[in-house]
Amino acid sequence: MYPCVGDYRGSRAVARAGLLSRRRLLAGISAALLVFLVVVPAVVAYASLHPARCKPAGTPAAYGLHYENFTVTTGDGVRLRGWIIPGSPRVVFVVMHGYTSCRADRRLLEIQAELARRGYTVVAFDFRGHGESGGTTTIGPRESAYDVPAVLSMVRRRYPGARIVLLGYSMGAVAAIMAGSRASGDIVIVADSPYPTLDEVIPRWLKSYMGIPRAYSELIGFWGSLMAGVDTRFGPILLDRIDKPLLVIAGDHDPLVTPAEARAIAAKSCCGRALIVGGAGHVESYKTLGRDRYIEEILDFVNSTGGR
C-alpha cells in the first residue's frame, strides 16, 4: 500500500520541522559555547587589564613631609606620575605598589613616611594603568621592561652614585626583581609577596578572589595575554640568576605564593634571603609584624649588604 499525497506531504513537513529544530539546537549550542569560551573569559580578561583606579588615601603632606611631583615617559610612550620625598642622596628607596593599588595607598604611604623620617630619599610612582599614570596594566611584563627602567633613569640623573633600594609589593615586587636583575649599578631588591610566574598566579588569583576554577582561569589568562600582547610565561622563578642582593618577604598563608616558591626566588640571588612571616597572607607581613619590626627587617638587610 502506498501513502496518499496528504500523508507524504505531512511526512516532509515533519522532517523539515525536525531538521529546523536540530539546526536551532546546534545554533544554540554553538552560541552558548561561543559565550562560554570566548565572550565571558574575554570580558573578565579585559576587566582584569582595566581595574578600577586606586583611590588615593592622601599625600606625604598628610604626614608632615615635603614632596615633589614628577612625570616620566617610558620607552613605549606611557606617562607615569610619581613623587619624591627628598632625603639623603646616598640611599634612595623606590617604592612600587601592587596590582590594583597605587603610590597613595594608605599602607604604602605609611611605609614611605617612616623611611623618610629615618632620613632616606623616597621615590614612589603609579604603574601603568594604575593611579594617575596612563596606559594599561600588563600585571608585570611591561611594568618590568619599561616602567621601572624609566623611573630608575630619572633617579640616577637626580641622585648620581646613590644606592637604590627597589622595594616592591606583589606585582611591584616582581617588577623590582625582573628590572633590578637587569639593571646596572648599586641596587638592592626587597620583594614583598612576589608571584612565581604570571601564568601560575592568574589561576590562583581568580580562584582565591573570584572563585573561578583553574581550568577556566587559564582560559581567561589566554585571552588576557592576547589582549595585552605579553607572554604569561614570565616571572622571577624562571630567572637563572640575580646578581643583586635580594630579600623576599612572604606570608605562610599567602594564596598566591607559597613559602617554597619565595625561598626558591630568593635562592636565585647571589646573596638572597627569604623572610617567611607566620600567619601573614598576601602582602600582609607589614600588618603582621608591625611597622617598626617590618621596617627594621628591611633596613637590616640593606645595611648588611653594604648600605649605610
Image: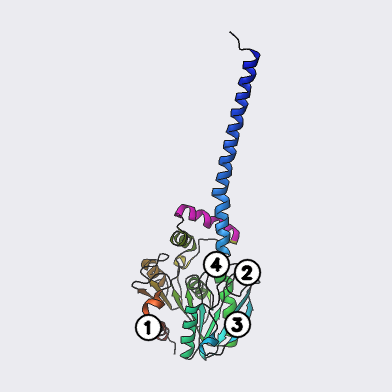
User: Label 1 neighbourhood size at 10 Å, few (<14), some (14-19), many (20+)?
Assistant: few
Judged from the image, the secondary structure of the residue bearing numbered disc 1 is helix
Q: Secondary structure at mark 4?
A: helix
Extreme-left residue of the structure = 278
> Mark 4: which amino acid?
Pro
Residue 55 at least partly seen: yes
Q: Earlier in the sequence, mark 3 or mark 2?
A: 2
Label 3 sits on a secondary structure element that is: helix
Magenta residues?
212-227
Identity of the amino acid at label 2?
Answer: Gly
**Residue at which label 3 appears:** 154
Q: What separation in Å lies between label 1 and label 4 (alpha carbons)?
A: 32 Å
Looking at the rendered structure, the number of numbered marks drawn on it comes to 4
Q: Main secondary structure of the magenta part?
A: helix
Which callout, 2 or 1, points at the residue further toward the start of the chain? 2
Q: Earlier in the sequence, mark 3 or mark 1?
A: 3
Image: 58 above or below 86 = above
Image location (x, y in percent) of residue 240: 45, 68
Tell me which amino acid carries mark 1: Arg
Separation (CA) of disc 3 from disc 1? 31 Å
- Between circles 1 and 4, the one closer to the viewer is 1
- Per the image, the residue denoted by label 1 is 293
The x, y position of residue 166, in whole percent, is 49, 79
In three-dimensional space, the C-alpha distance between marks 4 and 3, rounded to whole angstroms, equals: 20 Å
Q: Position of residue 302 (x, y in %)?
A: 43, 84
Q: CA distance from mark 2 to mark 1?
A: 36 Å
The mark closer to the camera, 4 or 2, is: 2
- Taking the image as drawn, is residue 272 in sight? no
Task: Point out which mark residue 135 bears.
Answer: 2
Q: Amino acid at mark 3?
A: Met
